[in-house]
Amino acid sequence: MSFPLYVLTSSAIAAVTMLAVLSLSSRRWLAVLAAFAGAIALLLVHGPLYFDFYADDAYITLRYSQHLADGLGPNWNSE
């Protein structure tokens, strides 16, 4: 799928979803807000558990990219 088609499709899905949520009754609207708030709270609690791994992943990507750019192939240690 090309990128413009992907953007168009995802935008259409987002618009239809927003229209469906806005057409809900007030009680269902509160349920949607509660679910959204719960998901955000879960991410805020669970996210810091993996914070230490972000730097490791970035360094691994940097190292592989550096070796690829130098023409040494996708490896960790190039001598």
Image (tube, rainbow, N blue to C red):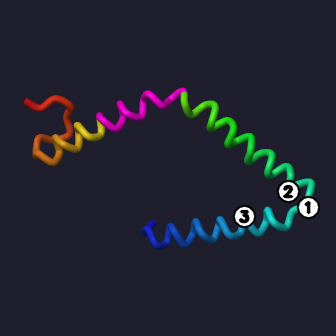
Horizontal side of residue 70 vs 46, given as left or right = left
The amino acid marked with disc number 1 is: Ser
In the rendering, which numbered label is found on residue 16? none
Q: Is residue 17 left or right of residue 56?
A: right
CB within 8 Å, label 1 to label 2: yes
Q: Nearer the observer, disc 3 or disc 2?
A: 2
- For disc 3, the marked residue is 17
Residue at figure coordinates x 81%, y 66% from the top left:
22
Image quadrant holding the N terminus, namely bottom left
**Residue 54 picture location, percent across and down:** 42, 34
**Quick one: which residue is furthest to the left in this view?**
79
Percent position of residue 23, x then y = 85, 67
The residue that label 1 is drawn on is 25
Q: Position of residue 53 (x, y in %)?
A: 42, 29
Where residue 11 sits: x, y (%)? 60, 69
What is the quadrant of the C terminus in the image? Answer: top left
The residue positioned 69% from the left and 38% from the top of the image is: 41
Marks 3 and 2 in Cβ contact (< 8 Å): no
Callout 1: SS = loop
Badge 3 density bin: few <14, some 14–19, many ≥20, Cα 10 Å: few
How would you rate the neighbour count of disc 1 (Cα within 10 Å): few for under 14, some for 14-19, many for 20 or more? few
Q: Which residues are magenta?
A: 49-59
Residue receiving disc 2: 29
